[in-house]
Image: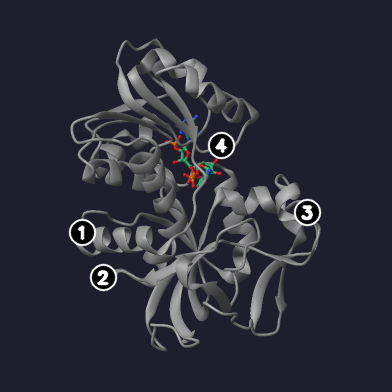
Amino acid sequence: MKKAIFEKYGDLDVIQIIDAPMPVAAKNEVIVKVKSVGLNPKDILVRKGKFKRLSGKKFPQTIAYECSGIIEDPNGSHFQKGDKVFGMVNGMKGRCCAEYVRISLNEIAKAPSNLSYHESAGIPLAAQTALQAIRDLGKLQKGQSICINGASGGVGTLAIQIAKELGGQITTISSQKNTDFCRSLGANQAIAYDGTDILKSDQKFDVFFDVFGNYSFKKTAHLLESRGIYISTVPKMEIIKEQFFNLFRRKKAKLVVVKSNRKDLQWLAQGLEKGIIKPIVDKVFPMEAIQEAQKYIATKRAKGKVIIQMD
Ligand SMILES: NC(=O)c1ccc[n+]([C@@H]2O[C@H](COP(=O)([O-])OP(=O)(O)OC[C@H]3O[C@@H](n4cnc5c(N)ncnc54)[C@H](OP(=O)(O)O)[C@@H]3O)[C@@H](O)[C@H]2O)c1
């Protein structure tokens, strides 16, 4: 079977498509025939070796953490061969950009029945990140205000819709060209960073979700309500340190580290089936164009998700 790998950390040219043996399912794992793969900035960071302490020195490493497909081998689980599923693998070792993948039962769920494979492949990582940040870390309550920075990208587009479903009053930050797009997804107020400096605003938010990660707790503290929560997606030393000081102050700084789990995937599948959450697919590339697809993500201009089609 074909899979996209890299033999060493480096630039785009380390990526290769190779023939590899079929994966073997361990206990509590199934084999999925992959139809579509969701790409993320994480794929690029890992390939460049930015997390090498966690991703290790063993090669080859496979690209991608999320996919959709059909169950090939249920391995005695509650799934049937042919079930349509979507999921995300945890940890720093990607597996999903392959014709077949082994995946733990807690990392997949039945895919939303109304979505195409392309649409469901881009949900698990970005949407679980948004859900776990806003609901679990931000504890956003009905009627509370949330500011989402980086609102037009893979995580941001889903964050707007999830915050809406949780009853939030939503302000988004994107470039001017994407403000209408953010409004169309549910933003009550859409600010353009290339027109307005949010840091000079006197608005207050219960939650500031810094998806793009170019602000910080220190920079945004004056925009937070007295018990407001700042959440970042980017594991910089500053946010890691800030979390220690949460014990001594009312305003909190938090880092989201997404963890795939069946309950959250099922929550999202329901929202997608009801039409409360809509998938936003920006571009679809064939597997052979994986370098081009990663190059596009690296521009930081993706409007929604970037997908690889496997067959
Ligand atoms: N910690 C975790 O568990 C976790 C999980 C998922 C993602 N992440 C991280 O979250 C970040 C976002 O991921 P993603 O998948 O959403 O990325 P993405 O889809 O590549 O984000 C692209 C978006 O970034 C926006 N953007 C570019 N410059 C901006 C700026 N100066 N201010 C605000 N927005 C800007 C662009 O909007 P405009 O074109 O309108 O500027 C574009 O829509 C990445 O750093 C990723 O590694 C972390």
Task: Report the disc number at residue 114.
Answer: 2
Q: CA distance from mark 3 to mark 1?
A: 40 Å
**Helix or strand or loop: what does disc 3 sit on?**
loop
Q: CA distance from mark 1 to mark 4?
A: 30 Å
Residue 95 visible in the picture: yes
**Helix or strand or loop: what does disc 1 sit on?**
loop
Mark 2 or 4, nearer chain start: 2
Q: Amino acid at mark 4?
A: Val
**Helix or strand or loop: what does disc 2 sit on?**
loop
What residue is drawn where x is 65% and y is 85%? 22
Q: Amino acid at mark 2?
A: Asn
Q: CA distance from mark 4 to mark 3?
A: 20 Å
Which residue is labeled 3 in the image? Answer: 9
Mark 2 or 1, nearer chain start: 2
The reply to whether dot 2 and dot 4 touch (C-beta < 8 Å) is no
Q: Is residue 180 above or below residue 106?
A: above
Q: Amino acid at mark 1?
A: Gly
